[in-house]
Image (cartoon, helix red, strand yellow):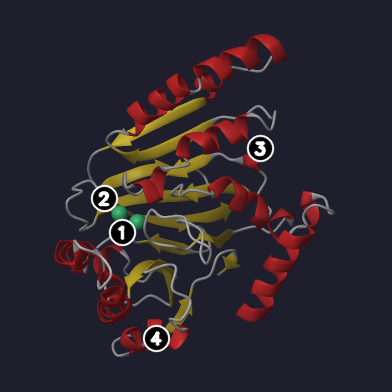
Amino acid sequence: MDNDRRQFLIGAASLALSSVPFSNAVLGQNKTGARLVLLGTKGGPSVGEFRKNASTLLLINGAPYVIDCGYGVSRQLIAAGAPLARLRYIFITHHHSDHNLEYGALLYNAWVTGSPLRIDSYGPTGLEAMTQAFFEYSKFDIETRIADEGRPDLRKLVAAHDFSGPGVVLRNDDVKVTARRVRHPPIAEAYAFRFDAKDRSVVISGDTAYAPELADFAKDADVLVHEVMYLPAVDTLLKRVPNAGRLREHLLASHTVPEDVGRIAAQAGVKTLVLSHFVPGDDNTITDEMWTAGVRKHFNGRIVVGRDLMEI
Ligand SMILES: [Zn+2]
Ligand SMILES: [Zn+2]
């Protein structure tokens, strides 16, 4: 199936969700193997009209693995046809809010679907404390619903796992998940994830400046999902802000321009490169050609310019 057709199907499925059972939605079909869906493709914390905040879904043999929980992730999962009741694994690349703002609410939203669940979440140091803090934030509601509605205790159904260095994060019968540190100052604990499923390997860069070590990590992967920043548009935006110099410095030190994304993809030898986490994410005058021109200077494999709810 080509991409346009696939996109259309996902779009059609999300529009039709209110009237069809989940089993008819694209992701409800009993396909086996690893399926990759971009839920939100915007970089940065502001909520915009064009792209949704960052999150990505891997559906492996029917189990949803959610990578990053930008604002709106619950809605986007439903739009993709991945029922919240089936949520099983969450991975956070780093603790910028565009990657974790809806983490707690996603746990909650899965809980109130009423299905018994166990959710394992994995993220850099701080995730366990954030999980406890969210339970504290929602204490009144959680305890009310346990007593009043007979629900199980959400706090006992979630296991949060901090990690503080590279290595294997999770291994089960379907997939091995490995983390590798990337370059996203001032955040030291920022990671990329590699998912090696039986039929497919997918690497998600997280937020990073040009990091040649990421090419090693992504070596021969089927798909590399990499963040990208288009500097001319950033410069236009910066003309309007008083702290432009400082902000430009931060962006250059912590994100990757298309030419360097192309270098990483070429060095890694991946089959497909998917651009996501677009900076700026709200500028719909930047064409696919503008996003990819720099990439193509170095990488001649397949390039996909990501959009929300696209399956790759
Ligand atoms: Zn980000
Ligand atoms: Zn970030």
Residue 290's mark? 4
Residue 61 visible in the picture: no
Which one is in front, 12 or 243?
Answer: 243
Left of 132 or right of it: where is 164?
A: left
Q: Badges 3 and 4: C-beta atoms under 8 Å apart?
A: no
Q: Amino acid at mark 3?
A: Ala
Residue linked to disc 2: 190
Q: Residue at x 58, y 68 (%)?
A: 310
Task: Estimate how packed mark 2 is, as few (under 14), some (14 to 19) or many (20 or more) residues with alpha carbons within 10 Å.
Answer: many
Frontmost residue, 219 versus 272: 272
Marks 1/4: CA distance? Answer: 20 Å
Mark 4 or mark 3, which is nearer the start of the sequence?
3
- Please name which of the two marks, 1 or 4, marks the residue nearer to the observer: 4
What residue is at 54 percent from the left and 15 percent from the top?
140
User: Residue 73: percent from the left, percent from the top?
Assistant: 54, 49
Marks 1 and 3: CB-CB under 8 Å? no
| Amino acid type assigned to the residue bearing label 1 in the image | Asp
User: Could you give the CA–CA distance between mark 3 and mark 2, rounded to whole angstroms?
Assistant: 29 Å
Which of the numbered marks, if any, corresponds to residue 220?
A: none
Q: Residues within 10 Å of mark 3 (few under 14, many from 20)?
A: some
| As drawn, 102 above or below 2 | above
Label 2 sits on a secondary structure element that is loop
**Pointer 3: what residue?**
85
- Label 2 – label 1 distance at C-alpha: 7 Å
